[in-house]
Amino acid sequence: MSAKTKLPIGQEAIEKKGWIGAHKYLLLRRISQAIFLLLFLIGPWFGLWIVKGNLAGSLTLDVLPLTDPLVLLQGIVARHWPEMTAIIGALIVGVAYALIGGRVYCSWVCPINPVTDGAHWLHEKLGLQKGWQPKKNTRYWVLGMVLIVSALTGTIAWEFVNPITMLHRGLIFGIGFAWSFVIAVFLFDLFVSRRGWCGHLCPVGAFYDLLGTKSILRVSARNRAACDDCMDCFAVCPEMHVITPALRGKGDETPLILSPDCTNCGRCIDVCSVDVFRFTHRFDQSPAPGRDDAATQSPARDARAA
Amino acid sequence: MSATKKPKVVDRRRFLMDAARAAAGCAVAGSLLAVYARDARALPAEALRPPGALPEEDFLAACIRCGLCVRDCPYDTLVLAELGVDGAATGTPFFTARDIPCEMCDDIPCVKACPTGALDPGLTEIDEAKMGIAVLVDEENCLNALGLRCDVCYRVCPVIDEAITLERQHNERSGHHAMFMPVVHAEFCTGCGKCEKSCVLPEAAIKVLPVRLARGKLGEHYRLGWEQMDENGAPLVDGLIDLPDRLPGPGTDNLATPGGFEPTFRLPSGGTGQ
């Protein structure tokens, strides 16, 4: 901890890089989220059919089929073998996220992300308790449950309650009372569990988490030697446990954030006034000395490294 | 040794405890989800699935609710169900015959648009679609049953004279008029709903119902002799005794046979014969 820990989150970065510079990836992310919604909306709004469908399944420019692989997987365990179009679509989506990071879906595409980000913002404003914090593997349990229920009921079970597709489909095709699911997620994150839905429960996030376990695109704390313990990255990170091993690692430990929980949102890059973080690939072997390697290097560590 | 062993026991206990809690939580949540999913499978009778839709149980395993069939429907017949507004499972495609019926496009664009096969790509002839079966649900208010020649359902039927025919019946009430009753032949009816849409009554007398509601089912032990005879080209049982037919005779109005008598009513002779 340092004296800077007490400063408002991101203040230093704003002073140093300007507001835009300190919110670059946040802005890009909001733009990306808006584009992924607008692409689907300009069809019904203006009759310009670039993309038809919704996040569960779509057809772009009448040639590119895309399918949500988790939705299709539930259909398969519910004993429906899909047509080739849907399989190809799911493979394209699966491979893309496997390369760029599964949870890029969560932070750059998912329409629920602005909702839970909003809930978190208000949560901080109101200074509420963090509330119930489920174990970190809870979401995998939920994912397993969803697949079991799909198999038992012979339906694509999560689609009966999935707030993501409820909201996305609702905005494009008419929402009915699906708002209630979105509001429920917002209130859950606000009052019951800080960052609870996306960070602990959502099975879609859990699926993309597993999908991106070996993804190429990663954030690296390469400049970790410059860290001044302001703690802002931990404050903004929706999955803060992913930062510690990379940021606090010693010289011989990788500075790459390799946890699949990382959503590649880039907010840590924004908020760091000393530019510790950057986007890179998982094979990046650039040397990244730990912050106080010289002071802490023990004979045992040297022996292990050798 | 004991110092390293002890935390392991605690870890194992904690692991088992956590696993039990997570499993119990998921069992509760999963049961609720399963109940909800089962409830949502009850498709209301007015909600008709698009052509080629798999049976409802299979449909909900196959339909990913992407709405591509809705987008490719040129007549805006299909819509996606909205939660709490429409009865069909949220986000699944359906149509309401009385609002916009299916126009039965020859190229069946909705089936072609379906990426998963929830709408069976094996359906290539729209006339073979079975979205439902039309049923004349109200034989008392149907205008044809009241003796008028409305005939609208018959006229609009895309499979006219096959799916709907007009069957002439004696009008018992007037005693000397005919009624032309619309009769649906399920074998040919596609369930497009044009008849229901066009019925001139404020509430349609002919409605398209899901097949499960519209039809009975014949016990499998029944054999239809006339069909078997057609297939066989001859009676299935040889050596049937051909008893003499009972001919009309005394007590009937058949004048052709001896003993017949004069009918009670006869057209005026020399009249133009209305």
Image (cartoon, coloured by chain):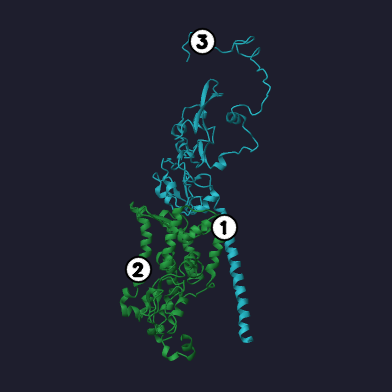
Chain colours: A green, B cyan
Task: Please provide percent x and percent y for residue A8.
Answer: 39, 80
Which label sits in the foreground, 3 or 1?
1
Instruction: Please give the count of numbered marks on the rendered protein.
Output: 3
Residue flagged by tag 2: what amino acid is it? Leu
Q: Is residue A306 above or below residue B42?
A: below
Residue hosting label 1: A151
Residue hosting label 2: A28
SS for callout 3: loop
Q: Chain of mark 2?
A: A
Task: Please provide percent x and percent y for residue B270.
Answer: 48, 8
Q: Is residue B9 above or below residue B136?
A: below
Q: Dot 3, how many residues are within 10 Å of its Cα: few (below 14), some (14-19), or many (20+)? A: few
The structure residue drawn at horizontal position 53% and vertical position 44%, both measured from the top left corner, is: B45
Of the numbered discs 2 and 1, the one sitting upstream in the chain is 2
Q: Dot 1, how many residues are within 10 Å of its Cα: few (below 14), some (14-19), or many (20+)? A: some
How far separated are the C-alphas under marks 2 and 1? 39 Å
Q: Chain of mark 3?
A: B
Residue hosting label 3: B268
Which label sits in the foreground, 2 or 1?
1
**Camera-side residue: A20 or A63?**
A63
**Position of A13 compared to B12: left or right?**
left
SS for callout 1: helix
How far separated are the C-alphas under marks 3 and 1? 77 Å
